[in-house]
Image (cartoon, rainbow, N blue to C red):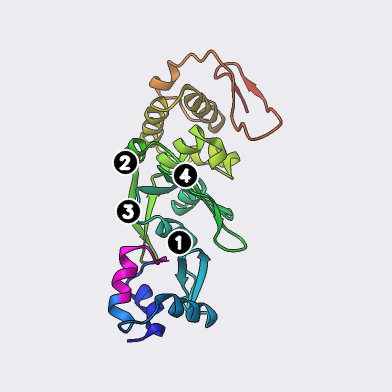
Amino acid sequence: MSCADLPTWYLRHRIAVLDVRSTAFRRAREEVLPSGYDANVCLRRLVKAGKVRRIRGGLYVARDPVRETPPIAVASGVFAEVPHYVTTDAAVAHHGLIDQPIPTITVVMSRARRRFELDAATTIRPVTLDEGRIRAADAYDTTVEGFGVRVASREQAVVDALAEPSWMIHGDLLAEILAAFTDAEVARTASSVLDRTTATAQRLGYLLEEAGRPVPTSLAELRPVRAVRLRPQKHARGPYSSRWRVYG
């Protein structure tokens, strides 16, 4: 085999990201590249030939001549060897709850990493959460077009968006998303937000009323004393709910 076979190896194994520091790359190099062949030379040639696309230092995507690798698979693939999961916008889009463009894919992990551009239309944004919460999160491994992805459940994605409103671009759609939840999903979401912060629970209560959904008993017993914003990143305050002490 030769250097030209390296992208084919990744596509055949449905590995979205070629990371030169990863176990997968060491395996690919042993199976594909001739002994003594400089991997950096190979990658430069592949980039020049349009066979792989460099997304940042040491990270590449093998280019499929038929279709682009799904951005959510690339975002999860970048962090495949550390605990992580994709959440908020990209997660709820994956679950079919919104169909808006996703300009930012948010990936939860325990150590801070810099955000970077995947392409002209998409940014990968790593955010941090305590490792214990990451391991306890309602997230699971699945595939998108055969590529491995670790993604938050519907409820987990909403909980993250309520706990950290800046993590979600399309936060104005949360009431619509909650309107599509089953009663069991609403109950699980309420239980999860109460395990985060009072502000998170306040936001959920406000949005459930906006969505016309009954408020679970556990959440209805909440009596907040401090006012919070639904989306603190917005400069203007919206309508105020005296029941939940939330500025919409």
Measuring from the top left, give residue 108's x and y in whole percent.
43, 45
Res. 135 mark: 2
Residue at (58% x, 63% y) in the render: 119
Residue type for callout 2: Arg
Measuring from the top left, give residue 158's x and y in whole percent.
47, 39
Label 2 or label 4, whichever comes before in sequence order: 4
Q: Within the magenta stretch, is there residue 76?
A: no
**Left or right, residue 142 beside residue 210:** left
Residue 16 visible (yes or no): no
- SS under mark 4: loop
Asked if the residue under mark 4 is in contact with the one under mark 1, i.e. CB atoms within 8 Å, the reply is no
- SS under mark 2: helix
Measuring from the top left, give residue 9's x and y in whole percent.
34, 77
Label 2 or label 1, whichever comes before in sequence order: 1
Residue beneath label 4, please? 112
* Camera-side mark, 2 or 4: 4
Q: Residues within 10 Å of mark 4 (few under 14, many from 20)?
A: few
Query: To which quarter of the image does residue 99 belong?
Result: bottom right
